[in-house]
């Protein structure tokens, strides 16, 4: 069985993603069969992992996923791999509200569940001896979380390095890297996180530059030696599908405007026997005419609203499928596209598919962020009324109008607060702002 380790940090912005990508690229180029996972519901970082390894990257989420789902995904990620590198989320112990130090959805929760060693990335700019207190605190905070080493990021000169080495020694932690500050390796961001990996025309060159800049300062052999076999990894085969397939032949929008499909969802659909047929709305491709279901995942339709509105083949294909009773499901950006109109950042109104009575705006921005549990209010392709799913909401768009029609979900947040009903269903078309991750 493959061995694994977890890359974590004390806070967001410490360099976890950059360090993880460097490790994945360096390990792959050394000839190792390396795989990856991403803790939390982020749908952008896994795209970068997949580009670096050539393998799907699965999200692991202790709040949104059942234990069986987590175990199955870890098993699948490790198939034919020698080393599994997991990237954490936020700070090591940060997650949803909970009554223990292992917050649901946190990296620490996954570390405790799997028993995998944690390597901390500590941003060292502006800190010296105090690093010892931070490292000792993180190491001792919970007995089931094994902090096994540290990589210092943004290290200054020799004097700074010596101070950090002494701090790590006081915490009894091996130093696995002293990374210098490098100006040209930061990835560009936008309102939902990093610019998507598929939008980087020269991504291989970026990996070359990243590996060349950080590789000489990382102890790859020591990192690999720390890895251990996970305590939880089980193959549930076709018996486990986080979200039920919408049909037998599913057309899935897949381009830079609709790129937020979870790898675990697609894995489950294929395992259940569904055929996946991708198409590009931005290239004015209509969904496959033989599909009995269409899925529009989240993404950035608000950045391409004018193009989408003018793409007749795409829009007419959706409308024709709706008339024929094909199940059409939209999440977040997909939901916005199924609506009547989308108002872009400049306040320009663009006609959308008109299949749901919804008008959304990216000009009137407001952050909506957090875990969600949605319970179906009526029978449909996702299951019978009362079936519950866990997922995530993250968008800045606001609903300008949501006309008459059946609501899709009754929604609660991670603290079990009632958020009312969300989404719409009309005929065979349905959607909401929720990104579904797993059954509750």
Image: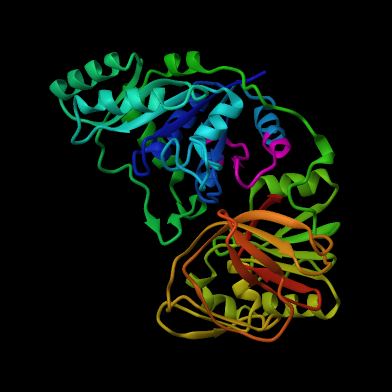
Residue placed furthest toward the front: 99
Screen quadrant of the N terminus: top right
Q: Colour scheme of this structure image? A: rainbow
Residue 58: say if magenta: yes
Up the image or down, 227 lies above or below 108; here it is above
Residue 276 inside the magenta-drawn segment = no
As drawn, 437 above or below 168: below
Asked if residue 147 shows in the view, the reply is yes
Residue 409: percent from the left, percent from the top?
A: 70, 67
Residue 260 in sight here:
no
Q: Position of residue 127 (x, y in %)?
A: 20, 32
Give the residue at x 45% y 42%.
94
Q: Hey, which quadrant is residue 323 in on the image?
A: bottom right
> In the visual, does 149 lie left or right of 27?
left
| Residue 424 sits above or below residue 347 on the image | above
* Residue found at x 44% / y 66%: 367
User: In screen coordinates, is 319 left or right of 103?
Assistant: right
The residue drawn where x is 60% and y is 40% is: 62
Q: Nearer the viewer, residue 289 or 42?
A: 42
- Magenta-colored span: 50-70
What number of labels is visible?
A: 0
Residue 104 x/y as whole percent: 56, 42
Residue sitting at x 16%, y 24%: 160
In the displayed structure image, the side of residue 29 where residue 62 appears, left or right: right
From the top left corner, tell me how far across and down residue 348 is, in percent.
46, 85
């Amino acid at each position: 069985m493959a061995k694994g380790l977890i890359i974590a940090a004390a806070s967001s912005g410490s360099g976890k993603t950059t360090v993880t990508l460097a490790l994945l690229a360096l390990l792959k180029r050394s000839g190792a069969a390396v795989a990856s996972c991403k803790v939390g519901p982020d749908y952008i970082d896994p795209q970068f992992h997949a580009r670096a390894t050539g393998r799907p990257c699965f999200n692991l989420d202790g709040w949104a996923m059942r234990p069986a789902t987590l175990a199955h995904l870890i098993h699948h990620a490790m198939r034919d791999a020698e080393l599994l590198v997991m990237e954490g989320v936020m700070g090591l112990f940060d997650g949803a509200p909970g009554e223990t130090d292992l917050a649901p959805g946190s990296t620490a929760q996954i570390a405790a569940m799997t028993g995998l060693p944690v390597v901390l990335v500590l941003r060292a700019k502006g800190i010296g001896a105090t690093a010892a207190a931070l490292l000792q605190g993180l190491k001792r905070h919970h007995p089931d979380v094994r902090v096994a080493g540290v990589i210092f990021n943004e290290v200054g000169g020799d004097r700074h390095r010596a101070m950090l080495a002494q701090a790590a020694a006081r915490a009894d932690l091996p130093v696995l890297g002293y990374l210098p500050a490098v100006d040209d390796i930061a990835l560009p961001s936008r309102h939902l996180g990093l610019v998507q990996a598929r939008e980087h025309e020269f991504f291989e060159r970026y990996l070359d530059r990243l590996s060349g800049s950080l590789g000489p300062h990382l102890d790859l052999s020591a990192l690999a030696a720390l890895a251990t076999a996970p305590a939880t990894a089980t193959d549930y085969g076709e018996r486990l599908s986080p979200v039920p397939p919408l049909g037998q032949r599913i057309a899935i929008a897949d381009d830079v405007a609709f790129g937020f499909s979870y790898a675990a969802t697609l894995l489950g659909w294929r395992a259940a026997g569904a055929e996946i047929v991708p198409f590009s709305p931005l290239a004015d491709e209509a969904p496959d005419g033989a599909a009995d279901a269409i899925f529009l995942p989240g993404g950035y339709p608000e950045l391409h609203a004018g193009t989408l509105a003018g793409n007749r083949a795409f829009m007419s294909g959706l409308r024709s499928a709706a008339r024929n009773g094909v199940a059409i499901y939209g999440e977040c950006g997909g939901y916005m596209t199924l609506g009547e109109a989308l108002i872009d950042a400049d306040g320009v109104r663009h006609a959308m598919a008109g299949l749901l009575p919804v008008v959304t705006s990216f000009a009137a921005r407001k952050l909506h962020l957090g875990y969600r549990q949605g319970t179906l209010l009526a029978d449909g392709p996702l299951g019978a009324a009362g079936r519950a799913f866990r997922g995530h909401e993250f968008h800045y768009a606001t609903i300008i109008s949501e006309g008459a029609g059946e609501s899709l979900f009754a929604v609660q947040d991670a603290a079990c607060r009632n958020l009312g009903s969300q989404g719409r269903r009309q005929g065979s078309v349905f959607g909401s702002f929720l990104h579904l991750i797993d059954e509750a």
